[in-house]
Image: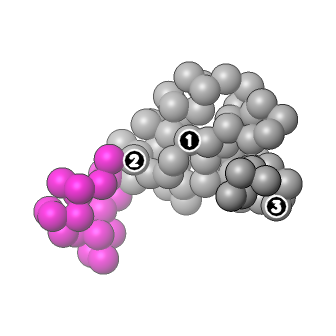
C-alpha cells in the first residue's frame, strides 16, 4: 500500500512525520544506533506518471491519507 498525495511537499511532510513516529516506536529489531544513524526516511517519496506523489504506508504512521495498492504502471522502469 502507498499513501497518495497531490503535491510533493504534502508527501514529504507526511513521510517525515511517519519517520519521526517510526523512530519513537523503535521495536527491538530496530534498536540499533548504527541503523538509526544511517536511516533518514521511512520511505522514498516518488512521483507517479500521473503526477501524484506516493510513498509506502508506515504501519505506525498516520493512516488518514488516501491509500492505494501498488500498480505496475505508476513508474517508468529503465527509461521505458
Callout 3: helix, strand or loop? loop
* Residues at marks 2 and 3 touching, judged by CB atoms closer than 8 Å: no
Residue under label 3, please give it.
72
For image coordinates 79% across by 53% down, the residue present is 80
Residue under label 2, please give it.
41
Who is closer to the viewer here, 49 or 52? 49
Which segment did they paint magenta? 23-40
For image coordinates 15% across by 64% down, the residue present is 34
Who is closer to the viewer here, 37 or 63? 37
In the image, residue 26 lies in the stretch drawn in magenta: yes
Indicate the position of residue 77 as horizontal and vertical percent values: 71, 57
Asked if 64 appears above or below 31 in the picture, the reply is: above
* Residues at marks 1 and 2 touching, judged by CB atoms closer than 8 Å: yes
Left or right: where 17 falls relative to 79 = left
Assess disc 2: are there few (<14), some (14-19) or many (≥20) residues with their C-alpha within 10 Å of its C-alpha.
Answer: some
**Is residue 69 shown to the viewer in this render?**
no
Quadrant of the image occupied by residue 32: bottom left
Q: Which mark is nearer the camera, 2 or 3?
A: 3
Asked if 36 appears above or below 62 in the picture, the reply is: below
Assess disc 3: are there few (<14), some (14-19) or many (≥20) residues with their C-alpha within 10 Å of its C-alpha.
Answer: few
Asked if 20 appears above or below 68 in the picture, the reply is: above
Residue under label 1, please give it.
45
Amino acid at each position: 500500500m502507498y499513501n497518495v498525495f497531490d503535491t510533493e511537499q504534502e508527501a514529504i511532510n507526511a513521510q517525515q512525520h511517519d519517520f519521526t513516529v517510526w523512530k519513537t516506536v523503535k521495536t527491538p529489531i530496530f534498536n540499533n544506533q548504527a541503523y538509526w544513524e544511517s536511516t533518514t526516511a521511512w520511505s522514498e517519496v516518488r512521483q507517479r506518471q500521473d503526477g501524484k506523489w506516493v510513498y509506502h504506508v508506515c504501519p505506525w504512521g498516520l493512516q488518514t491519507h488516501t491509500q492505494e495498492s501498488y500498480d505496475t504502471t505508476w513508474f517508468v522502469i529503465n527509461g521505458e
